Amino acid sequence: MRMLAVFAFALMGYFVTDAPVAARDSNTVIQVMLAELGHQRPENCPGRWCACYLDNVLARSGLAPRGSNIARDFANYGAPAEPGQIGAIMVMSNHVGVVVGTCGNGQVQIVSGNYSNRVALGCYNASRAIAWRAPAAV
């Protein structure tokens, strides 16, 4: 279906790019993750579980999962998002989470799994990001 839409846009003279877009469909992801603050590692996730947890939340939110338990694999997931935007997925070399606000001093606040072995809020320098991504529709 997506290929059909891309073809239709091409026929109309529109070009599909990899330009940054607003983080889309992220409200449900944020709500689910915030409702699970304090939860421990899901049974189906490995020891380093931030990516596995996010993948599970995406699927439960009706969005496309990445299909990986490796944080940096999210660098190619979905579409580019504006850095630090609420709802954007902040991908770091060894951690991944969803932006829910700011902490000051150039830091963003994310909710993620495996932050002190729990689903929790944490503050990170935006410069640690290797990618900012928007959730992908199924």
Image (cartoon, grey):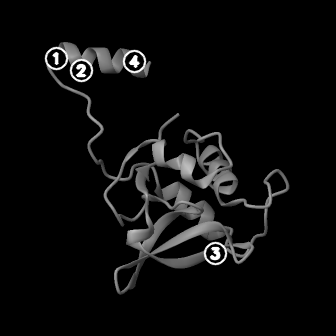
Lower position in the chain sequence, tag 2 or tag 3: 2
- Residue 45 versus residue 63 in the image, above or below: below
Taking the view exactly as shown, the residue that stands out farthest to the bottom is 105
Q: CA distance from mark 2 to mark 1?
A: 5 Å
The amino acid sitting under disc 4 is Met
In what element is the residue under mark 3? strand
Residue pointed to by mark 4:
3
Residue type beneath disc 1: Met
Farthest-out residue, left: 13
Q: CA distance from mark 3 to mark 1?
A: 45 Å
Relative to residue 34, is residue 86 drawn left or right?
A: left
Amino acid under disc 3: Ala
Dots 2, 1 in contact, CB < 8 A: yes
Q: Residue at x 75, y 70 (%)?
A: 39
Vertical comparison of 11 with 16: above or below: above
Quick one: 80 or 63, which is closer to the camera?
Answer: 80
Q: CA distance from mark 2 to mark 3?
A: 41 Å
| Residues at marks 2 and 4, CA–CA distance in whole angstroms | 10 Å
Circle nearer the N terminus (3, 1): 1
Q: Which residue is mark 3?
A: 120
Q: Which residue is mark 1?
A: 12
Q: Which mark is residue 9?
A: 2
| Badge 4: residue crowd in 10 Å (few <14, some 14–19, many ≥20) | few
Q: Earlier in the sequence, mark 2 or mark 4?
A: 4
Q: Which mark is residue 127?
A: none
